Each structure stands twice: as C-alpha cells, then as structure tokens.
Amino acid sequence: MENIQGCGGGGWTLVMKIDGAKTTFSYDSDLWTNKMPLNQSSGKSGFDYDETKMPSFWSTPFTKLCLGMQAAGQETNWITVSYKASSLHSLMSTNTHHATNVGRGRWKSLLADSSLQINCNMEGFNVKPSGGENDAAVTRIGILGDNGNNCGSCNSRIGFGSKGLRLGQHDDNSCGNECVDIIADNGEKHIKANCFILLQ
C-alpha cells in the first residue's frame, strides 16, 4: 500500500486488521505473542472489517508504524509512530513495556469524540498499570489514562489490543476508546473501532 492519508507514502505493509467489537485481539490473546497467521486472505481485501494477522507481524523489521481507527459511521483517522524493531512480535512477545513519545493529543486524534482521564498518559507497546490492578485498562499499542498520577489503576485507554473493566469500562472492547467519567477530558466513552496496523 503506497500512500495513506495521515501516514504518508513510501510503501506500507499490512500487519493486522482488528474489529474492536470482537475479542479476537484482546490484550491476553496468544495472537500477540505467537507466530501464527490469521485469515491471511483478508490481508488483501483492503480496509474492511475482516480481521487478519499477517506473517509481517514476525518477519518484517520496521522503523515506523501507521495506525488507523474507524468508529462506526466515521472516516478512518491515522497516525504514525516512530520506533525501530526487528519485528512487532519481538516487542510484543516480551510482555514488557516499550515506551513511545507520540503524545496524548495524537493518540486522541485517532477517534473524533475520544476521551481520556487527564493523568498517567503512559504510552507505547504492552502498556499496563504499575499497580497491577487486575481489572485496570491495558493495551498492546496505545495510551492509558488515570485519575491518579502514578498509573496505579488506569480506568481509560485508547489502543489496539486492549481490555479492562475497572469502574465500568467495557472489557470486550479490543480496539478503540474506553473512559470512565472520573477526571476525564471528554466524559465517559465506550467506542469500539475498526483498526488497522501497518509498518515500514
């Protein structure tokens, strides 16, 4: 795929398509840590709702990710994330946090009506609260918000490969935005998105 609005040109390789209304790619899914493809034929069907995981997940080095989210009835919004790795699998399989510096505003731009709690703002890959609260927000790629400063029990997220039900989040939202109305910048949100991950 040559040119994507919001990500630019240079040639992009599809890695995943995620339907946030399904739990196929929830945070704890083995698909984030194994080298098994899923529905490879859907990798050629364009930006649709057919979930897929391509061999590029474990076989392709990258310096940039192109991430897209499409809420129901909305256009797809895109951002780029600069990060160098031998593969996405090499980051995910460690289950340890790898930080990025995308910034809260750009993560929020993935969805037009998004909301996050104002504190914490921990972002990157394998993002999980330091406090280890069982039901807190977690995400494989994205950002977490909290009402406290220490990221101890996050109650909001924008991300790909997410889960968490603490204080009313929807645990089955695997890609999109969840936010409880406690020190949130745009109120309570439960937005499940159609999501795309590409790399170059």
Image: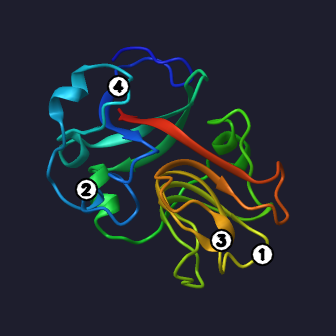
Q: CA distance from mark 4 to mark 3?
A: 33 Å
Q: CA distance from mark 4 to mark 1?
A: 37 Å
Q: CA distance from mark 2 to mark 4?
A: 21 Å
Going from N to C along the chain, the mark reached first, 2 or 4, is 4
Camera-near label (4 vs 3) is 3
From this viewpoint, is residue 149 visible? yes
Q: Amino acid at mark 2?
A: Leu
Q: Position of residue 45 (x, y in %)?
A: 27, 19
**Which structural element holds mark 4?**
loop
Q: Amino acid at mark 3?
A: Cys
- Residue carrying label 3: 154
In the rendered structure, the answer to whether residue 69 lies left or right of residue 103 reads: left
- Residue carrying label 4: 12
**Which structural element holds mark 1?**
loop
Residue nearest the observer in this picture, 146 or 58:
146
Rendered view: 21 above or below 146: above
Going from N to C along the chain, the mark reached first, 4 or 1, is 4
- Residue carrying label 1: 149
Rendered view: 69 above or below 1: below
**Coloration mode:** rainbow
Q: Position of residue 96 (x, y in %)?
A: 41, 72
Q: Amino acid at mark 4?
A: Trp
| Res 29 → quadrant | bottom left
- Residue carrying label 2: 31
Going from N to C along the chain, the mark reached first, 3 or 1, is 1
Q: Position of residue 156 (x, y in %)?
A: 67, 61
Residue nearest the observer in this picture, 195 or 15:
195
**Which structural element holds mark 2?**
helix
